[in-house]
Amino acid sequence: MPKHYLMCRPDFFTVEYAINPWMDPEAGADRDVAVRQWEGLKAAYEALGHTVSLIDPIEGLPDMVFAANGALVAGGRVYGARFAFPERAAEGPAYLNWFAERGFPTHEAVHVNEGEGDFLAMDEVILAGTGFRTSREAHGEAQEFLGRPVVSLTLVDPRFYHLDTALFPLHGRNIAYYPGAFSEGSLRVLRRMFPDAVIAGADDAEVLGLNAVSDGEHIVINSEAHDLQLDLKRRGYEVIPVELSELRKAGGGPKCCTLEIRGKTDMTTSAEHIDVSERRSAHNYHPLPIVIHEAHGAWVTDVEGKRYLDFLSGYSSLNFGHGNPKILQAAHEQLDNLTLTSRAFYHDQFAAFCAGLGDLTGKDMILPMNTGAEAVETAIKVARKWGYQVKGVAPEQANIIVMEDNFHGRTTTIISFSTDPDAHDDFGPYTPGFTVVKYGSVEAIRDAIDANTVAVLLEPIQGEAGVLVPPDGYLRQVRELCTSQGILMIADEIQSGLGRTGKTFACDHEGVVPDMYILGKALGGGVVPVSAIAADEDVLGVIKPGQHGSTFGGNPLACAVGNAVIEILNTGEFQERAAQLGEVLHARLREMIGHGVVTVRGRGLWAGVDIDPSLATGREVSKALMARGVLAKDTHGSTIRLAPPIVISQEDLLWAVDQLADAIASFR
């Protein structure tokens, strides 16, 4: 099982005092060697899949590298250290503050103890050492705070001044130990509790071979503890030898450098979640450094409990707010009944979804899918098949006119006609059959049409490009051109549709009805991925059984959620609200032009704000905005997209814009 460790880089490590028999200030230590050996230990943990968090070293605390002494963490609670020697006294508060800042319940110890140096957690009990550093009173104090039984063990050999120098847990119910370090009474306790323990000899103990770290399968151990390594291998453990000879000059080994963070979850802070995410997931996104835990309406809360106003809405997936009660009720009810049948069978949510979405779009038929990119791929297939079967285009010759700066998804076919180098480059060979023209120019479309053109695919407003609104009349002229030329007009309303712009669809602003709508994002209410294309029977009727499909497309849960979304939109309330609040938003944003803002574009509750590039990038402003409690996202250098949930209050809306103004002003 992966573990979570806290370590401290030995940037200030030295041996300048003697508080245990291993330390000789005259002999000193080589800090560079210590750092290299420490880095090898950290790398060994990471190679085993463990998470390593770091606490910043503090100058003047050379032993802070021995993180195990800083605290005991069990069940997510932190019992702080109170060091026996003044040379190390400041380490205790430093470690305790690290945990407190990350939301751990902490206890500032009254009695002298040196953390995991003398406390080793097992499954049922905590083994606790005393005799040289940790007082017996601290054992009782730890038990009271942590609520776990503590078994006291007395150390008698000063070379083994901490329990972790003479004993380590193999797993939660067994140990390895060196008998010579313990009193007779403590030996009797150990023999009774752990009759199958691994017994180490003096030679291995004297190189701190017992100062080892086990995850239950692998044991990271001092490379010089030869016999102990053989014994462990015979027990079936994988031994990971490490060289820490320089740190041993201060009495430390692998365990001394390693404080295990045990909790109800291995990750409790944003930094910890982000660290694991960055190491264990592909870097196909560059998120802002926030880890969201819960959300309601227009507000989200991170894992530390800080609230933020959501000004992005999952790229319009959350038009109706986080946790919309009507949508959640529909999802909960359906979860209890039926979630998936595949399209091999009908289910009782499907007909209502198809009819409802057909009525909302004014189309005869619906083809449901899951993600937006799937819906775009579906639209392309339908347009091509329509071209061959209805228009009579020669086989393999169909082409579709698309726009510069488009964003329709990231599948292989879709990125084949992308003009964004990040989305396009190095993913070839590319799918043919697309002609790219300038967005907003009807003449460019007219010039590109030929006998094999089957469709024009466009976004009524280009979201990813920076919320680019085409010239007035553009959509109407495209509609007229497509009609006169006998080709399909396909509107990708995945981001712009379903209330975002103050109308049900962005095309509605010009009274335009495309031949095919592509819908997604908000259709799933922020609960499940739901997408679809909508068209009349003379277009969508070209698809026959076996020619297109999706196991999850149109599943019962998706349809139940989609039905709730359709009911919400049929009231018209959200469209009206987006229009009214959109006027407030854009009026306030326009006041910022000339004050760090170059241009504002958009429609309804959707805006693209171009920041003066001489001041800051869009990401820099987004991070400054996040620090002020508002979440938005940059695109294409200096542009920020704003798309709050339509449920946002006017008060919150204006507050967020004020934060944006303040964030921009901070760069001036």
Image: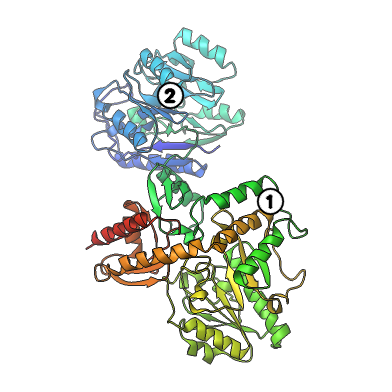
Task: Answer with left or right where residue 195 lies relative to residue 107.
Answer: right
- Residue at the spot of label 1: 339
Q: Position of residue 376 (x, y in %)?
A: 60, 71
Task: Tell me the kind of residue under disc 2.
Answer: Asp
Q: Nearer the viewer, mark 1 or mark 2?
A: 1
Q: Answer yes or no: is residue 612 visible.
A: no
Rendered image: mark on residue 257: none
Q: Residue at x 69, y 56 (%)?
A: 349
Q: Does dot 2 land on a helix, a strand or a loop?
A: helix
| Mark 1 Cα shell of 10 Å, populated few (<14), some (14-19), many (≥20) | some
- Residue at the spot of label 2: 164
| Mark 2 Cα shell of 10 Å, populated few (<14), some (14-19), many (≥20) | many
In the figure, residue 230 lies in which quadrant? top right
Task: Answer with left or right where residue 548 lies relative to residue 251.
Answer: right
Q: Earlier in the sequence, mark 1 or mark 2?
A: 2
Q: Answer yes or no: is residue 447 visible.
A: yes
Task: Tell me the kind of residue under disc 1.
Answer: Thr
Q: Residue at x 35, y 29 (%)?
A: 70
